[in-house]
């Protein structure tokens, strides 16, 4: 079924278990890596090393996980690397950056209004919304999820046209537990809207699975069986529409893993273990993720090379569950990660230049949402 990569340290018990699984369960092309490569960036105090460099802009929002953190930031803002300027976005929330990294969609607090702005914050379009969340961008606009009706619509934000998305996808099944807010609940479309990825239940066998459905051919392309359930986190499509990444249960229900499901029908197991928070680079070549080390009880930032299966550990870790996925730059070269302090009362955002192997703290108590050109 595809590549099976394990990166836990050889001295840990988990690594031995993974090796046994690698040899015993039905995964073809199994590769085993006893430990990731190390690439520990030099931490720079202050922003001097970023002065004058055009890395683009970062959109920062308030952290809504606690009232204490939320109240530490007055307004979301756009941060420009070149001059370290911060431009506030008044009353904005539910932000989403377009796939080409040129536009921002967001809603206004208490105003039932969706805004489209450019990378400088200039408003280009507005439209009415109600009881809807922004699920993400596709080629033809935005997908909005109506949580009051469990329905999704395609919105053209420039003319306000709405198109209801299919609700009768074959065997679609939604787990109703309130804590499941990701792949077990929503339908994920590729950017061209020609493929849908969703959770399903076979009505004859009562078995659960994820389905990759070709909406043009009206047929199933691939299936990922599920005997158990992982924690529910969003699935992510590659921008070229050729694969979707999901954190899910293994077929036997005994492990969780990151899977890649391809539109040609191939299913790959990318990594086994607790790694639910991830981000695929825009060029699809690398996958950044937070993985849990059961021995040290830490979450560690690593990057998987999707072609070779090699994993690089960037020596950045946290005691606490990562609240946000790593954020890739538009050119797929650099990262920004979001960490909590040991006392849980503050946060910090760290920029990593992978080529120069340096890391710089950008800001405190502001959550990175999107990276614009």
Image (cartoon, rainbow, N blue to C red):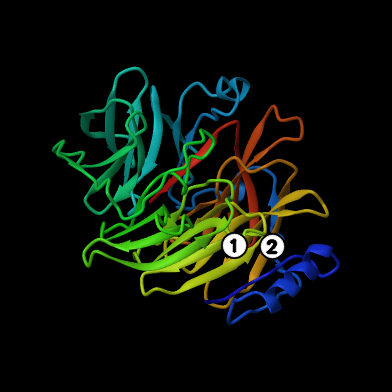
Q: Position of residue 72 (x, y in %)?
A: 58, 22
Q: CA distance from mark 1 to mark 2?
A: 24 Å
Q: Position of residue 331 (x, y in %)?
A: 43, 61
The residue that appears at 47% across and 61% down in the rendered structure is: 332
Q: Which residue is mark 2?
A: 313
Q: Is residue 132 left or right of residue 41?
A: left
The residue that appears at 28% across and 44% down in the rendered structure is: 142
The residue that appears at 37% across and 21% down in the rendered structure is: 109
Which sits earlier in the primary sequence, circle 1 or circle 2?
1
Report the front residue among 327 and 20: 20
Q: Nearer the viewer, mark 1 or mark 2?
A: 1
Q: Is residue 303 left or right of residue 238?
A: right
Secondary structure at numbered mark 2: strand
The residue that appears at 55% across and 30% down in the rendered structure is: 63
> Outermost residue toward the bottom?
29
Q: Is residue 242 visible?
A: no
Report the front residue among 206 and 224: 206
The answer to which image quadrant residue 124 occupies is top left
Q: Which residue is mark 1?
A: 250
């Amino acid at each position: 079924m595809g590549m099976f990569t394990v990166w836990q340290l050889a001295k840990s018990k988990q690594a031995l278990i993974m090796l046994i699984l690698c040899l015993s369960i039905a995964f073809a092309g199994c590769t085993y890596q006893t430990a990731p490569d190390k690439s520990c960036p030099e931490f720079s105090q202050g922003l001097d090393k970023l002065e004058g460099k055009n890395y683009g802009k970062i959109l920062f929002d308030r952290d809504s996980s606690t009232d204490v953190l939320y109240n530490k930031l007055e307004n979301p803002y756009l941060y420009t690397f070149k001059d370290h300027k911060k431009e506030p976005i008044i009353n904005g929330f539910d932000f989403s950056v377009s796939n080409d990294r040129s536009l921002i969609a967001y809603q206004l607090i208490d105003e039932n209004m969706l805004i489209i702005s450019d990378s400088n914050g200039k408003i280009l379009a507005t439209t009415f919304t109600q009881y809807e969340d922004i699920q993400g961008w596709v080629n033809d606009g935005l997908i909005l999820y109506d949580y009051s009706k469990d329905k999704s619509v395609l919105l053209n934000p420039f003319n306000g046209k709405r198109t209801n998305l299919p609700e009768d996808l074959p065997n679609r099944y939604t787990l109703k537990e309130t804590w499941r807010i990701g792949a077990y609940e929503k339908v994920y479309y590729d950017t061209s809207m020609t493929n849908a990825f969703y959770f399903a239940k076979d009505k004859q066998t009562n078995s659960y699975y994820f389905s990759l459905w070709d909406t043009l051919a009206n047929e199933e392309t691939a299936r990922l069986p599920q005997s158990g359930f992982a924690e529910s986190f969003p699935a992510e499509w590659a921008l070229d529409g050729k694969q979707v990444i999901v954190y899910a249960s293994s077929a036997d229900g005994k492990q969780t893993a990151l899977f890649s499901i391809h539109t040609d029908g191939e299913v790959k197991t990318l990594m086994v273990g607790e790694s639910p928070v991830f981000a695929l680079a825009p060029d699809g070549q690398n996958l950044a993720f937070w993985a849990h080390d059961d021995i040290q009880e830490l979450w560690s930032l690593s990057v998987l090379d999707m072609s070779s299966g090699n994993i690089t550990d960037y020596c950045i870790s946290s005691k606490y569950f990562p609240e946000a996925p790593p954020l890739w730059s538009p050119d797929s070269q650099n990262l920004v990660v979001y960490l909590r302090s040991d006392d849980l009362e503050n946060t910090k955002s760290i920029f990593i230049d992978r080529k120069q192997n340096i890391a710089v703290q950008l800001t405190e108590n502001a959550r990175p949402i999107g990276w614009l050109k």
